[in-house]
Amino acid sequence: MFIKEFLKEKKRRQNRKAVKTATIATTVGIATGVAAGVISAPKSGKETREDIAKGAEKAAEKVKETISATMDEMAKVAVELEQKAKAKFADAAEVVEEKAEEVKKDAKK
C-alpha cells in the first residue's frame, strides 16, 4: 500500500515538474516573440529600445509570478507529504506495538 502511494506521488511530482517546465518555456517563448516583433517593427532606435525594455520587464514579471506560484504549490505538496509520512509512521508504530504485545503474550505462554 505504501509503495503504491509513493509511486502515485512520484508521478504527481513528475507531472508538476513537466507543467512548471512548460510554463517557463512558454514564458520565454512569448518574451522571445515579443522581442523579435519589436526589433523587426519599423520604429526609431529609441522607441525600439523602450519597447524592448518594457517587454523585458513584462517577461521578468511573468517569470516571477510563475516561480512564485510554483513555490507556493511546492510548499503545499511538502506539507501534504509531511502529513502523509507522519500518518504512515503512526500506522507503522501501531502495527509494531500490536506485534510486540503478541510476542509478549506468546512468550508468557
Image: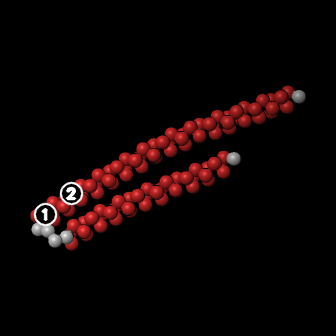
Secondary structure type for disc 1: helix
Which residue is found at the position 70% from the left and 33% from the top? 94
Which residue is found at the position 29% from the left and 57% from the top? 59
Q: Which numbered circle lies on residue 54?
A: 2
Secondary structure type for disc 2: helix
Query: Between residues 13 and 93, which one lies in front from this camera angle?
Result: 13
Asked whether, in this view, residue 60 is left or right of residue 104, the answer is left
Asked whether, in this view, residue 24 is left or right of residue 35, the answer is right
Quadrant of res 55: bottom left
Quadrant of res 35: bottom left
Amino acid under disc 2: Lys
Amino acid under disc 1: Glu
Query: Between residues 82 and 22, which one lies in front from this camera angle?
Result: 22
The residue carrying mark 1 is 47
The picture places residue 63, in percent across and down from the top left corner, at 33, 54
Query: Between residues 12 and 34, which one lies in front from this camera angle?
Result: 34
Asked whether, in this view, residue 52 is left or right of residue 10, the answer is left
